[in-house]
Amino acid sequence: MSPISRGFFGRRQPVEDTSRVPPGQYVTRDFPVLSAGPTPHTALGEWSFTISGQVDEPVSWTWEEFLALPSETPTVDIHCVTKWTKFDTTWKGVSVDTLLSAVNTEAPYLTAWSDGGYTTNLALDDVTDGKAWVAYEFGGAPLESEHGGPARLLVPHLYFWKSAKWVRGLTLTPDDEPGFWETYGYHNHGDPWLEQRYQGD
Ligand SMILES: Nc1nc2c(c(=O)[nH]1)N[C@H]1C(S)=C(S)[C@@H](COP(=O)(O)O)O[C@H]1N2
Ligand SMILES: [Mo]
């Protein structure tokens, strides 16, 4: 008998494209929920999105105004520092380029802040040129609150803790100010391809 039988191949799962799996990650089809605190439930009538800080003039959108902004439908792979990677997630949202075009700024950094008090810091270079969105649909449906609805930041090229759930605004800053997990020892940048999980990596 041949050492590798037909039955063996017949039972095999489809092989993942390993070139899309960053070092130390495994691929999951689930969508795990990871939150540091309770899920906030902000009524859409109370919701707004604000760009403030080092800008010429702060700008705010209501929920209705936000939905009327030009939107995009990115399909992206996401990578959590707890080692799961999920392929081909589909979103709808407004690109951060579109949002930032409403202000004039020289600031090189920003802090994304959320209902519930979560923050995360990002370099402007990491969220511009088509690299980040404020997403309000996942898989063709309104984003579920446990996954950050009504809207969350989506920065798929960095570990998923940078993708702030329940995001309400971006504060432009002259200096890089560590956010929630960055203060607790997570890496400041968080590039999954460089395995920048924790400070010192
Ligand atoms: N506001 C907020 N955003 C957050 C978090 C959080 O605790 N609060 N956790 C982060 C982490 S560590 C991860 S891995 C992802 C998880 O997103 P998910 O629950 O949709 O999978 O959200 C990120 N954004
Ligand atoms: Mo995470």
Image (cartoon, helix red, strand yellow):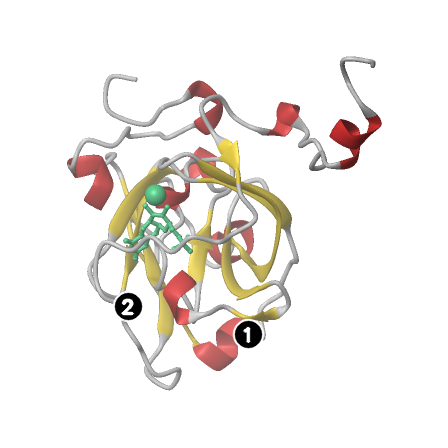
Q: Residue 92, image x and y in percent?
A: 60, 62
Tell me the SS state at disc 1: helix
Q: Amino acid at mark 2?
A: Thr
Of residues 56 and 48, the one nearer the viewer is: 48
Q: Quadrant of residue 197?
A: top left
Contact between marks 2 and 1 (CB within 8 A): the answer is: no
Q: Quadrant of residue 169?
A: bottom left
Residue underneath mark 1: 67
Of residues 196 and 112, the one nearer the viewer is: 196
Q: Residue 41, image x and y in percent?
A: 30, 77
* Left or right placement of residue 73 versus residue 136 in this view: right
Q: Amino acid at mark 1?
A: Leu
Q: In which quadrant will I find the N terminus?
A: top right
Of residues 91 and 39, the one nearer the viewer is: 39
Residue underneath mark 2: 39
Q: Residue 57, image x and y in percent?
A: 34, 60
